[in-house]
Image (cartoon, rainbow, N blue to C red):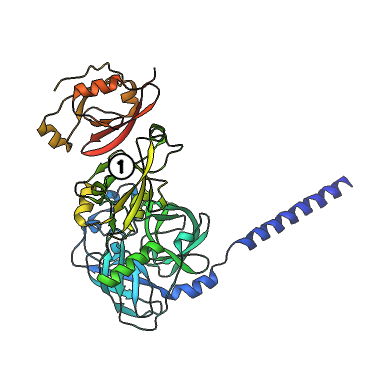
């Protein structure tokens, strides 16, 4: 009898698990209808170059373990061959959106449609900063994608990619949105795209292909992956469609893209800096340098200000600021909410236009005893040394003996330009300021290291 009860119990449990399993499977999305509707508007793009680009001359072994765009590697020796990517039709009269790196430097661009027709494409315009390119083919009544809303996406939503990984046309992969608003290191020193991070399997050849939501609307353009092997590792990044369509409008209108420019270098605000500035939590973008003749300088912004809001949009992470400013039209009058000397205020700024030169600028005595309270030995600088370091004021760190300076991250050969929001112009002045620093309070220190300004924090415990 006991054996019979045990068998019944096992059967019941097995049946229950089976039902749960079937229910779980029933909750998973089915992408068949989405693919039937959307796939005809996805195209394959091949670009032939006159000569190998820098990217094509790299062997796969030479590519660092970092973010890599989805490009097939060239054979050894850099022999030119067509580079393959993906794209999608955004209007029935032949406008196609793809990545700039798919077609950059191409002498001929060919587009293969889903019905096997091929057309040579004309480049309408391209934008390297957002890695987007707009093409046009001579055709009518083409199938088109439906444009979605990337801003409305939520982390955890299902998304689907259609493209040509390794040349396998109209391959479909699926995953979820892993994060939004990602800032990635860029080789040109600027970052104006708040990327969507997904776990959708993406590989070389998916470049420029669409990312769909479950409604079958395009919410992103697959652009980059993180890889240590050249293949998919679970981290892929897409350009939000909201950003892309703003670029498309400008490319259609004038063949190029203009962006808002503030003229500052920034750094993130950590817990210590937040305490030093009287913030209840780390947030905002800390200004470490203001460029001459920039909108920021004209508006009266200063090094050491923390930008909390830009034109009504909160700056939670420092990386939010370039995204928001870049999408602001030039000549816009913007309200910038800042913290200065632990007090909040609003500064009005007339946004400038970002130009190539501005992008390049972004990419670009007597000793104090070593036993002072900060634990650093500094010396005065002559005009030539200041010019060489790229500063107008400051003292050179000759040695870091330990204490708050070392803990705070100050290094030998740093130039200290401000201490507790006050400019430092001589070693004697620095010594006086250090002597009067209050204990047990986080103090901001602006340093310049390798011509790049940065704020650190020291706290003297007494």
Under tag 1, what secondary structure? strand
Classify residue 381 as left or right of residue 113. Answer: left
The location of residue 42, given as percent across then percent down, is: 41, 72
Q: Nearer the viewer, residue 306 or 356?
A: 306
Residue 82 lies in quadrant = bottom left
Looking at the image, is 97 positioned above or below residue 128? Answer: below
The quarter in which the C terminus is drawn is top left
Residue 284 lies in quadrant = top left
Q: Is residue 46 visible?
A: no
Q: Nearer the viewer, residue 216 or 192?
A: 192
Across the whole image, how many numbered discs are drawn on residues? 1
Q: Residue furthest left?
A: 384
Q: Residue furthest bottom?
A: 140
The location of residue 134, given as percent across then percent down, is: 31, 70
Q: Which residue is rendered at x = 85% and y = 47% of the image?
A: 3
Looking at the image, is 130 positioned above or below residue 408? Answer: below
The residue under label 1 is 287
Q: Which residue is rendered at x = 46% and y = 36% of the image?
A: 280
Q: Is residue 65 visible?
A: yes
The location of residue 65, given as percent across then percent down, is: 33, 46
Q: Which residue is rendered at x = 25% and y = 42% of the image?
A: 289
């Amino acid at each position: 009898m006991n054996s019979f009860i045990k068998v019944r119990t096992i059967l019941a449990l097995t049946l229950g698990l089976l039902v749960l399993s079937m229910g779980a499977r029933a909750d998973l999305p089915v992408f068949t209808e989405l693919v039937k509707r959307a796939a005809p508007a996805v195209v394959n793009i091949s670009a032939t170059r006159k000569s190998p680009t820098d990217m094509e001359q790299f062997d796969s072994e030479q590519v660092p373990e970092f973010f890599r765009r989805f490009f097939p590697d060239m054979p050894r020796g850099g022999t030119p061959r067509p580079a393959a990517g993906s794209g999608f039709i955004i209007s029935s009269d032949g406008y196609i959106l793809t990545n700039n790196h798919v077609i950059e430097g191409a002498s001929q661009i060919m587009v293969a449609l889903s019905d096997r027709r091929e057309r040579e494409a004309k480049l309408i315009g391209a934008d390297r900063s957002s890695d987007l390119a707009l093409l046009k083919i001579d055709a009518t009544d083409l199938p088109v994608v439906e444009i979605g809303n990337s801003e409305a996406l939520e982390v955890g939503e299902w998304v689907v990619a259609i493209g040509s990984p390794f040349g396998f046309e109209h391959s479909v992969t699926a995953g979820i949105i892993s994060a939004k608003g990602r800032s990635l290191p860029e080789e040109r020193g600027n970052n104006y795209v708040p990327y969507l991070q997904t776990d959708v399997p993406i590989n070389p050849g998916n470049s420029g292909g669409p990312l769909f939501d479950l409604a079958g609307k395009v919410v992103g353009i697959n652009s980059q992956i993180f890889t240590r092997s050249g293949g998919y590792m679970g981290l892929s990044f897409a350009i939000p469609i909201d950003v892309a369509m703003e670029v498309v409008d400008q490319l259609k209108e004038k063949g190029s893209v203009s962006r808002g420019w503030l003229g500052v270098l920034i750094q993130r605000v950590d817990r210590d800096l937040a305490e030093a500035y009287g913030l209840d939590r780390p947030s905002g973008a800390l200004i470490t340098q203001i460029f001459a003749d920039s909108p920021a300088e004209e508006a009266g912004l200063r090094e050491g200000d923390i930008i909390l809001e830009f034109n009504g949009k909160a700056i939670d992470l420092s990386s939010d600021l370039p995204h928001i400013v870049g999408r602001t039209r030039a000549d816009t009058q913007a309200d910038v909410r800042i913290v200065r000397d632990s007090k909040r205020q609003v500064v009005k700024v007339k946004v400038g236009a970002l130009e190539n030169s501005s992008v390049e600028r972004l990419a670009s005595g007597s000793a104090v005893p070593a036993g002072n309270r900060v634990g650093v030995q500094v010396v005065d600088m002559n005009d030539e040394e200041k010019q060489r370091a790229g500063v107008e004021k400051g003292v050179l760190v000759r040695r870091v003996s330990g204490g708050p300076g070392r803990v705070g991250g100050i290094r030998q050969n740093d130039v200290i330009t401000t201490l507790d929001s006050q400019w430092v112009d001589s070693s004697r002045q620095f010594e006086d300021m250090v002597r009067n620093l209050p204990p047990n309070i986080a103090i901001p220190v602006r340093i310049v290291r390798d011509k790049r300004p940065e704020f650190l924090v020291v706290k003297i415990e007494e």
